[in-house]
Amino acid sequence: MPIVHPEAAQVSAGAEATSDNALDPILQIERLTFAYPDGRVALRDVSLTLHRGEKTALVGPNGAGKSTLMLHLNGILNAANGAVKVAGLPTSKENLPRIRGIIGLVFQNPDDQLFSPTVFEDVAFGPLHMGLPEDEVRSRVVEALSQVDMLEYQHRLSHHLSVGEKKRIAIATVLSMRPQILALDEPTAGLDPRARRRLIELLRERSETMLVSTHDLLMVRELFPRMIIMDEGRVVADGPTEELLADEPLLQAHGLELPRC
Amino acid sequence: MHIDAFDQYQESDSLVHRLDPRVKVVVTALFILSNALLPDGAWAGFLIAFGLIALVAILARLELWRVVKRSFIALPFALAAVTIAFAAPGPPLFSFALGPWEFTVTVPGATRFLSILLRSLLSVQMAILLTMTTPFPDLIHAFRHLRLPHSLVAIIAFMYRYLFVLSDEALRLLRARAARTARLDDRAVGGSVLWRARVTGNMAGQLFVRSFERSDRVYNAMLARGYQGHLYTLSPHEMSGFDWAALGFFALALLALQIFARIG
Amino acid sequence: MLAQPFFPFIPQLHIPDGFLSLAVAAIFWLLSLVFVAVGVHKVQKTFNERLIPLMGIMAAFIFAAQMLNFPVAGGTSGHLLGGALAAIVLGPWAGILVMTSVIAVQALLFQDGGLLVMGANIFNMGILTALVGYGLYRPFAASRRTVQMAAIGVAAWFSVMAAALLTSLQLWLSGTSTLNVVLPAMMGVHALIGLGEALITVAAVSFIRQARPDLMGAKQVREQGGWGWVAAGAAVTLLALLLTPFASADPDGLERVAINLGFMHAGQDAPYQLLPDYTIPFLGESPISGILAGLVGAAVVAALVVLMVHLLRRSSTLTNRRA
């Protein structure tokens, strides 16, 4: 059963979706409430738990608070109320360097994610700033680029890449840090069908815990057993993807639509 | 038009391309300095300098005439130097009349003007060769290793990355304006000059706000990957024996050029 | 520049190599280095990790904004140089670093402006514009909107005029142009170009104030630069105001002043010569003199080679990572 009343049902939602590995929560968000300095409330009492290896989609209309939630995962934004724990570590200042190595956060616009002149420098940025020695950095760049099937692009200039190439390399920029959780914001947005398909296959092969914000419900159905719906800063539903996608009134109420095919 | 058209770098595997970018930067700077030190009218010196340009172009497998043609971009500025051809005192070379005015070009004036022009063309040509044979990120590394202030080099690196992104945005704004303007030529369309200036200013303001917001997102992306206020980079370049030899050759060539130009 | 294939709109203030004498180029490199060094120091002292990506993207913004133009009349167009805008919105020190990056990248990537003369270009288009642009705007930063906008317009116009004036003087001191021609020509053209600069800058700032009032608050202005900038900006503007009519009306007068102050050699010696007549004076016009002069020129090159080799050696022994 999909849970439509979040406040009452948060705790059971996490347990229900991942009963087999419920003992190993890797990401815990508790009663997070956040307002921007201009007064706009972006998150209202958000709670959710992710377990190791769990693949979860985060859906909802624009402005629902998905991206804001992502920025809380590694302490880029800090809510006045509520708590975030990554692998048991609270997102306090002294934990941030470790947490940022655990969570690989990939932003929606690859032109923001890829800020270095060359692909190599961008993929090396994470390991380099984790303080790894030069040889290790170089081997991780090769490893990460191979994993997204982009090794031959390492000396290319970032502004010469297509959107699809940029999106794959954006994922490589966090894979090189060997994260335990991948948090991706709109990984398939703006991709043509072929690039989208390649990206879905790439994500399918990854074993990391995933939290992926997206509007692409077909991809959600294909890849993510669990789905969280957000609207107006709240979690309004959290449960098995197939059940939520079958609940048309729920989808409609939050501006979602599963394409027919 | 995509903004990539601005990039002059020519991919190749020539000797010049493989040279350490620091050597190329230093040689270019020395060459331009040497031009500035050449006396007026040292024609042989200018010719040898052009010989060096030709040598580099050939070694880089670039077409010399394309380099020369591109160097003409500095020509319009020569307008500023034309008057010196008439003003320098000395024996007249030739005179001509333009309406009621009579102009006399003097020998030292013509020498001075031509020398300025040659100095400029040669210097621009070497700078073009540097750009055509060195990817800009390598130049950035060279600056870092030549001990330019790190924050300035980092600013230049970010600027280079976003130059293309923001120029594309600016072109889109211009196209959007053109699409809403009935006539695209320079005649007064779409209101007064003041109104047009305001539209352009609004575009600049819009671009600024977008750029500012982008810098916030970029900063977040840096934080997410472990940035804590210090930027680290790898050093991809090592000076090889060949690099030292190339530097030595050019330094000697320029020294010889300076001496030859004054006795020749 | 007229014949530039891609950037037909950029003001004619980017001096290419070859047009300034070594002495003038060196003096302005030195002046610019002082300002840039102080700017770098100030930025590092703030410990604001946000500033580096911000200034890099702002430099890209200025570059892109210089492409925006609007038709004025007869095929000419108004466009932005951006020095005043950068200084007003980002503060004078950040503005200087941003404009320095813009000028450096334009020279290196597009040969728009030279390398040996880059110091002069940075001073004219980055530092002078910040001095005048920010200095004249600062006293009115807290004034009523109309007063403030008028101040910004005047500041932007003067920033372009000051840059044009100094460019003319540099060309003249280098023996490249005669003052009686270059000065009225440059000032005349840039009086118009400056108008475009003023209009765009005012419109851009007023857009930014509406869209992001937080970026242009009184607090930001206080932090960015103090009254020293106002004094410097006013002094430069005043100097330009006094110098321009005097020089236009009596270029020979200015030349006499320059000679008296020791800027130029009396008589026929052109000021562009590092070594008078390229001979050593006391040896006369003999071949030996020519050879010696050549050796002096060569020695300058050699000294620079040694310095560069020194730098290369130092940097190759550095550890592979640097902050």
Image (spheres, rainbow, N blue to C red):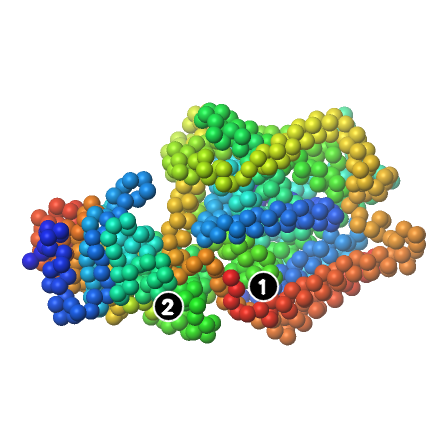
| Residue C98 x/y as whole percent | 53, 46
Q: Report, in whole angstroms, how far the alpha carbon at label 1 lies from the one at label 2.
A: 26 Å
Q: Amino acid at mark 1?
A: His
Q: In which quadrant of the rendered image does the N terminus of chain A lie?
A: bottom left
Labels 1 and 2 within one chain: no
In this view, the residue in front, C95 or C168, is: C95
- Which residue lies under the disc numbered 2? A176
Vertically, is C83 above or below A198?
A: above
User: Numbered disc 2: what chain?
Assistant: A
Task: Name the mark on residue B145.
Answer: 1
| Residue C279 x/y as whole percent | 87, 53
Q: Describe residue C230's horizontal placement relative to residue B258 as left or right.
A: left
Vertically, is A96 above or below B190?
A: below
| Residue C262 x/y as whole percent | 81, 40
Q: Amino acid at mark 2?
A: Ser
Q: Residue furthest left?
A: A1
Q: Describe residue A182's horizontal placement relative to residue C78 as left or right.
A: left
In this view, the residue in front, A214 or C14, is: A214
- Dot 1 crowding, Cα within 10 Å, few <14, some 14–19, many 20+: many
Label 2: element kind? loop
- Residue at 27% over, 41% down: A40
Q: In which quadrant of the rendered image does the C terminus of chain A lie?
A: bottom left
- Residue at 57% over, 66% down: B17
Q: Describe residue B243's horizontal placement relative to residue A173 as left or right.
A: right
The quarter of the displayed image where residue C161 is located: top right
In this view, the residue in front, B49 or C120, is: C120
- Residue at 34% over, 54% down: A76
| Residue B228 x/y as whole percent | 43, 59
Q: Is residue A21 visible?
A: yes
In this view, the residue in front, C43 or C207, is: C43
Q: Is residue A261 visible?
A: no
